[in-house]
C-alpha cells in the first residue's frame, strides 16, 4: 500500500530536506532582522508613501512594520509561501507524470498491477511530504526565532497561518499534477507551472487594485489564503481553506481521470 508514494518521497528526499532547511534558516534570518528592520527603524511612513500597487504587492493585511506579525508576513510569508514554495513544488511535480512518460519509465510502472488513477493519486500524496515538512519548518523558524530574540508573540496565530497554508499549497500540487498529465514534457510543465504561480499572483494584486475586475481574483489561490490575517490581524477565517481543500481534491481526481484517457506511447 502506498508503495508509489514512498518510492517518490525516497527518490526526492534530498531535495525535500535541502529546501526545507533553506525555508527554516531563511525564516530565522528574517526573525532576527525584525529588531533592526522592523522594530528598530520607522518604516511605516516610507511604506505609506509607496503607490498602491507596491503596497498591495507587499501584503494585504499589514498593521505596521513595527508589529512582528506584519513584519514576518511581508518579509517572509508573503514572498516565500506565495512564490518561492509554489515554484519549488512546480519543479517537484513536473516529473511526477510527465517526467515518467518522457523517460519511458511510465510503461514499466504501469506494467505492474496498479491502475492509472492510483499512480496519479499516489504521486499527488507524495507531494504532501514536502508540503507538510516545509510548513513545519516555517512554523519552527518563527517560533524558535521569536523565542531566541525575545519577541512577544502568541504562537497560536503562527500555527493558524501554517494550518491554512497546507490547503493553499495542495491546490498548487493538484494544478501541477494536472498539467503533468496534460503535457508530457517535464521542462514545459515546469515552465508553465512557474509561469502560472507568478501570473496568478499578479492577477490577485490587479483584482484588488482595478475596479471592475475584482472578480478575476477568485481564480487565484492567493485570494483564499492571506497569512497576514492570522499573523498581523489575529483573525482566523476557514472559508477560504474549505474552498482550497475542495479545489485540491477536484484537481487531483481530475488529473487521475485525464491520465486514464491519455495515450502514453507517443
Image (cartoon, helix red, strand yellow):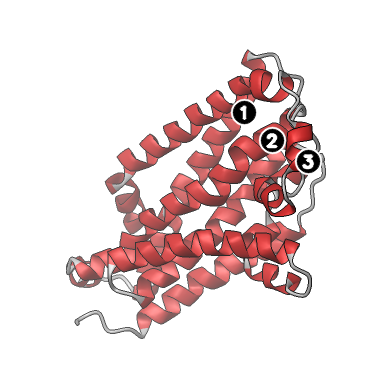
Please tell me how crowded label 3 is: few (under 14), some (14-19), or many (20+) other residues with Cα within 10 Å.
Answer: few
The dot on residue 142 is 1
Q: Between marks 3 and 2, how big is the CA–CA gap?
A: 25 Å
- Where the N terminus falls, by quadrant? bottom left
Residue that appears at 60% across and 68% down: 247
Task: Between residue 215 and residue 254, name the one nearer to us.
Answer: 215
The first of marks 3 and 1 along the sequence is 3
Task: Between residue 61 and residue 7, name the one nearer to us.
Answer: 61
Task: For the residues labelled 2 and 1, say whether their Cβ atoms are less than 8 Å apart.
Answer: yes
Please tell me how crowded label 2 is: few (under 14), some (14-19), or many (20+) other residues with Cα within 10 Å.
Answer: many
The answer to whether residue 76 is left or right of residue 264 is right
The answer to whether residue 195 is left or right of residue 236 is left
The dot on residue 48 is 3
The first of marks 3 and 2 along the sequence is 3
Q: Secondary structure at mark 1?
A: helix
Residue 17 coordinates in the image, percent (x, y) = 38, 36
The first of marks 2 and 1 along the sequence is 1
The dot on residue 158 is 2
Residue 232 coordinates in the image, percent (x, y) = 77, 38
Q: Is residue 52 visible?
A: yes
Circle 3 or circle 1, nearest the eye: 3
Q: Secondary structure at mark 3?
A: helix
Task: Between residue 47 and residue 191, name the one nearer to us.
Answer: 47
Circle 3 or circle 2, nearest the eye: 3
Task: For the residues labelled 3 and 1, say whether their Cβ atoms are less than 8 Å apart.
Answer: no
Amino acid at each position: 500500500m502506498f508503495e508509489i508514494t514512498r518510492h517518490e518521497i525516497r527518490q526526492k528526499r534530498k531535495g525535500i530536506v535541502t529546501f526545507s532547511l533553506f525555508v527554516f534558516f531563511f525564516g530565522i534570518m528574517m526573525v532576527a532582522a525584525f529588531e533592526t528592520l522592523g522594530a528598530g527603524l520607522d518604516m511605516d511612513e516610507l511604506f505609506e508613501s509607496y503607490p498602491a500597487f507596491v503596497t498591495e504587492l507587499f501584503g494585504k493585511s499589514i498593521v505596521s512594520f513595527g508589529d512582528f506579525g506584519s513584519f514576518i508576513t511581508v518579509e517572509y510569508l508573503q514572498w516565500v509561501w506565495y512564490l518561492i514554495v509554489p515554484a519549488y513544488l512546480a519543479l517537484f511535480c513536473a516529473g511526477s507524470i510527465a517526467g515518467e512518460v518522457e523517460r519511458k519509465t511510465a510503461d514499466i510502472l504501469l506494467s505492474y498491477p496498479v491502475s492509472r488513477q492510483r499512480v496519479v493519486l499516489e504521486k499527488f500524496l507524495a507531494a504532501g511530504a514536502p508540503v507538510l515538512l516545509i510548513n513545519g519548518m516555517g512554523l519552527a523558524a518563527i517560533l524558535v526565532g521569536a523565542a531566541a530574540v525575545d519577541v512577544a508573540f502568541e504562537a497560536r496565530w503562527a500555527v493558524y497561518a501554517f494550518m491554512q497554508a497546507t490547503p493553499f499549497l495542495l491546490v498548487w500540487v493538484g494544478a501541477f499534477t494536472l498539467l503533468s498529465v496534460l503535457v508530457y514534457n517535464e521542462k514545459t510543465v515546469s515552465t508553465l507551472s512557474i509561469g502560472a504561480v507568478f501570473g496568478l499572483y499578479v492577477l490577485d494584486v490587479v483584482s484588488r487594485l482595478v475596479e471592475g475586475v475584482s472578480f478575476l481574483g477568485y481564480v487565484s489561490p492567493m485570494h483564499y489564503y492571506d497569512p497576514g490575517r492570522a499573523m498581523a490581524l489575529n483573525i482566523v477565517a476557514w472559508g477560504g481553506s474549505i474552498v482550497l481543500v475542495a479545489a485540491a481534491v477536484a484537481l487531483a481526481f481530475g488529473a487521475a481521470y485525464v491520465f486514464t484517457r491519455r495515450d502514453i506511447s507517443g
